[in-house]
Amino acid sequence: MPAPPHAVSRLRTARLARSAKPFLARGGSRVLRCPDCRVALSHCLCSLRPQVATQAGMCLIMADIEPLKPSNTGWLIADVVADTWAFGWARTEVDPALLALLADPQWQPVLVFPGEFVAPQRLLTTWPGADSTHAHASAGGTGSTANANPGGACAAEAPQATEVLRDAAATDSTRAAPPATASARRPLFVLLDATWSEARKMFRKSPYLDHLPVLSLQPDQLSRYRLRRSRREDHFCTAEVAALCLELAGEPHAARTLEAYLDVFTHHYLQAKQQLPVDWHSAAHTQLRSLRPPDVPADADAPGSRQNHQNV
């Protein structure tokens, strides 16, 4: 039985319902795509979809047509992280459900954005309870071409993360009840899913996000994302940023699973675009299989064992 549609899928359906004309994906408008993974039917990867239990949640605020793009990686986040929400962004209005989520006392929402655009008193460079390994593994910014903020404040220059979180909670008048302590509340990473120019506009013109602390992350790696071009290698796609946030929050298995799933998605997408078969024994597939729970058969994603999918 197919999994129920997740938040990004539902947002895509709602966005399509408002469209006056069909959305044409760049370079592949006539490709017959699987509605559940958005890859060409001949290269469907639905049988590979992982889902990992996480303490952290993800809140995606998506630019208008971002949910419609088959190359969007916010979809992969929602595949992997069950507690993922997705909202469309508009300059003149905000979804009441988004405001309710940000005010929910079980969550500690933190906006992820490059520190060079943020007032120093809002900045975090680590997560409470995260060790130095997690902090070192992180990168900054979000969006389909997200900036990684190599010039952001270091941990010694920024206020202590726990203090900033507590201050943000104390000054948030929208909360219906006194919040729990920062350590008891679950992290909710707020990601602006858009091109870099769109994400900057969203950051400037979303006053309902102004009270949130901002997590500015510093990378020690370059982006591996190959489905859209960027002028800079320190621009990260949204799924890469989410994986780095999970690592920072102390959930390395979820982070590695999302990274591996992104690599598998990229392989299927590009192989379909180039009309080449899927290499089911590629390094990306091997890595994703190695991260599966022990009760999942090792050959569960082999072409002969997949159900209701096209042969490759």
Image (cartoon, rainbow, N blue to C red):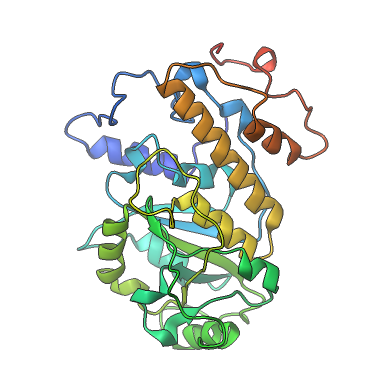
Relative vertical location of residue 25 with respect to residue 260 in this rendering, above or below: above
Q: Residue lying farthest left?
A: 20
Left or right: where 205 falls relative to 219: left
Residue at 18 percent across and 30 percent down: it is 21
The quadrant in which the N terminus is found is top right
Please name whichever residue, 172 or 191, is drawn nearer the observer in this view of the structure: 191
Q: Which residue is rendered at x = 63% and y = 53% of the image?
A: 255
Vertical position of residue 148 compared to residue 10: above or below: below
Which percent across, then down, holds residue 303?
Answer: 65, 15
43 horizontally vs 97: left or right: right
Q: Position of residue 298 (x, y in %)?
A: 78, 27
Question: Where is residue 265 shown, x and y percent of the image?
Answer: 52, 34
Question: Measured along the vertical axis of the image, is residue 10 above or below residue 212?
Answer: above
User: Count the marks: how many?
Assistant: 0
**Picture coordinates of residue 44 (x, y %)?**
52, 23
| 171 up-or-down from 144: above or below | below
Q: Quadrant of residue 232?
A: bottom left
Q: Is residue 188 visible?
A: yes
Quarter of the rendering containing residue 273:
top left
Quarter holding the C terminus is top right
Residue 171 quadrant: bottom left
Whether residue 172 is visible: no
Task: Report the residue at 62% width, 70% height from top.
Answer: 135
